[in-house]
Amino acid sequence: MKKFIMFIALLISLVFSNAIVNAGFSNDYFIDRVEIDGTVVKDSRFSFPDKTVAVERGEALPIDVWVGALNDIDNVRVEVSIRGYERGSIRYTSDIFELDQGTVPRIPLVLELPEDLDASETYTLVVDVSDKHNGIVEEFPLRVKEQRHLLNVLDVIFRPSSTVEAGRFLRTVVRVENLGAKTEDDIKVTVSIPELGVSTRDFIDELVSNEDEEDDEDQTSLSTNELVLQIPRDAKEGDYEVKVDVEFNRGSDVATVKKMVHVLGEGQREDETQTIISLDTTSQTLAENEEGTYRLTFANLGNERKLYSVEVLGAETWASLAVEPNFLSVGAGETGDLFVKVTPSEDASLGSKVFTLKVNANNKLVKEINLKAEVTEGGFSFGGVRNALEVIFAVLVVILIVLALVIAFRKVRGREEGPGIETNSEQTYY
């Protein structure tokens, strides 16, 4: 009798199910009930109108499936998935379990909805119950909407790499995107290494939502300026956790990601006393598209020839760079010059820019030097005035040379003609 009742329940389920599709058939079990985030979308004992559950992207979606057993059956599993996600698969599969005839166990499952799942779209949630021989598939509509406030850490970039020497600087750029429905202002980004007790922070003024993006100036994702952390000199060699916290919605919400960096023990460096490095300037005012040059003079006080090179960090996002020459060979007791050329790009933001030169001798770090560039609008800068004065000076030199030649020519011509008779003198007769 019990088996007959279960069979009748299966027929009712097949007739009155609100699922879009019921593919496959099993004589051993059936899908008795389905709940999505606490909302019943199927119950074999009742008839449900078509119901679409609305969920938010970026959340863990609980799904409960009750499987009714018509017979004793082993090696059964339940899988839930979402169709239509273009960047991969969204699925969760239960452990294998066995069913005892006449029971209706609840199988809990959880789907992690990606934060970049397209919002304001209707997807298909697939519930698949199967064993070795057959299975049952049912589908339910699922409406995905965006959260009011949701920021995502799109990328974390370490410069020059995720390996840094103790006593040196770790530079981090964080890219943040707005996946929520509201524009976010005054976003605080904090980068820290809790184990070493160091942290730094920066702010992103505004990130608009996709719906509010109206022109080219409105952006849904932006990068921070370089956040600089100095690794303590006494830090032990090993792997350390870097924590990135993004605070938004007036500090009510925090998005956190964690990355790993490797710290090298303070290694052997080229002895700084063997090289003297001098600069003609540590700060310049540059207009957009105007090239500025920083000259480094190396004095090799050692007993052997050294090969010097310079790596520029922190300027590649707002300027084009050139180092001439790429390598400078300086003999013992000799000096040589190397030039770092920086040209702010047209879209570079105005204001003070700080960047760093890493100076190497024979592939070993000698020194890190911080330089400054004040970026101004095109049209006026000290460098532009200097160039204009140089042109004017050159023109004046040319004019003076021409005048000198004219005067000299006239003097030579006068000597060749000799003393002559005045042709314009007047005579008076009495």
Image (tube, rainbow, N blue to C red):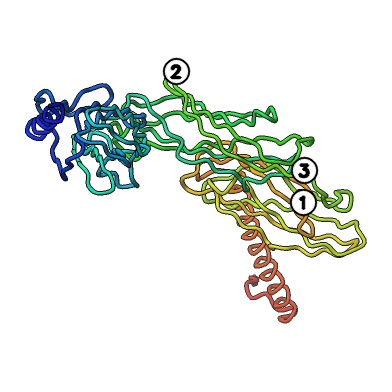
Camera-side residue of 266 and 130: 130
Which numbered dot is residue 241? none
Counting from the top left corner in percent of width and height, residue 391 is at: 61, 57
Q: Which comes sooner in the sequence, label 3 or label 2? A: 2
Amino acid on which the number 1 mark rests in the picture? Leu
Counting from the top left corner in percent of width and height, residue 311 is at: 67, 53
Assess disc 2: are there few (<14), some (14-19) or many (≥20) residues with their C-alpha within 10 Å of its C-alpha.
few
Q: Closer to us: mark 1 or mark 3?
A: 3
User: Mark 1 touching mark 2, by CB under 8 A?
Assistant: no
Q: Which comes sooner in the sequence, label 1 or label 3? A: 3
Extreme residue toward the right, this view: 303
Which numbered dot is residue 265? 3
Q: Residue at x 79, y 50 (%)?
A: 366
Q: Quadrant where the C terminus lies?
A: bottom right
* Separation (CA) of disc 1 from disc 2: 44 Å
Residue 204 to residue 266: above or below: above
Counting from the top left corner in percent of width and height, residue 224 is at: 51, 36
Residue matched to label 2: 252
Counting from the top left corner in percent of width and height, residue 185 is at: 42, 24
Residue matched to label 1: 365
Q: Quadrant where the N terminus lies?
A: top left
54 vs 198, left or right, is left
Please say whether residue 259 is visible from this viewpoint. Answer: yes
Task: Give the SS element for disc 3.
Answer: loop
Amino acid on which the number 3 mark rests in the picture? Gly
